């Protein structure tokens, strides 16, 4: 799994709006999709247990085959609102 910041804006000295790309790989497209769903559910349920995080929204989840390894891969796009001063 990889997590990369792909954008977002520091909205104020205390609020950071972050766009993330989360990629997961699997042996098959089905395995990759199941892992992506598990990651999605974990992200949406666990965010309030992480200090400084105000909101997390999974905006997309889609098949995203890896052209280099030819492995099955899914990508989630996630928006996070966090405290910038935390």
Image (spheres, rainbow, N blue to C red):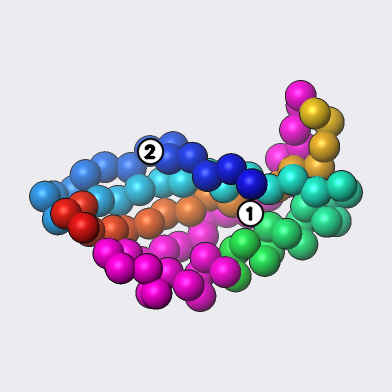
Decide if residue 25 is in sight here: yes
Tell me the element at label 2: strand
Residue 69 located left or right of residue 46: right
Q: Residue shown at 76%/56% (left/top)?
A: 33
Residue 61 located left or right of residue 35: left
Q: Residue shown at 42%/54% (left/top)?
A: 79
Q: Which residue is mark 2?
A: 7
- Is 83 magenta? The answer is no
Front one among 9 and 52? 52
Q: CA distance from mark 2 to mark 1?
A: 17 Å
Q: Position of residue 49 (x, y in %)?
A: 39, 74
- Is 46 magenta? The answer is yes
Q: Residue shown at 16%/54% (left/top)?
A: 85
Q: Position of residue 31 (x, y in %)?
A: 83, 56
Q: Which residue is mark 1?
A: 61
Tell me the element at label 1: strand
53 above or below 9? below
User: Going by the picture, which residue comes out furthest to the top?
Assistant: 68
- Quadrant of the rendered image containing residue 72: top right
79 above or below 10? below
- Quadrant of the rendered image containing residue 69: top right
Numbered range of the magenta stretch: 42-68
Q: Are marks 2 and 1 in contact (CB under 8 Å)?
A: no
Q: Position of residue 47 (x, y in %)?
A: 42, 69
Front one among 55 and 39? 39
Residue 11 located left or right of residue 25: left
User: Going by the picture, which residue comes out furthest to the right?
Assistant: 28
């Amino acid at each position: 799994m990889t997590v990369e910041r792909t954008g977002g804006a520091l909205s104020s000295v205390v609020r950071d709006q972050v766009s993330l790309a989360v990629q997961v790989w699997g042996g098959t497209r089905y395995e990759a999709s199941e892992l992506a769903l598990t990651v999605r559910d974990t992200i949406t349920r666990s965010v309030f247990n992480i200090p400084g995080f105000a909101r997390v929204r999974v905006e997309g989840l889609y098949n995203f085959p890896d052209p280099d390894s030819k492995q099955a891969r899914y990508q989630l796009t996630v928006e996070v609102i966090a405290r910038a001063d935390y």
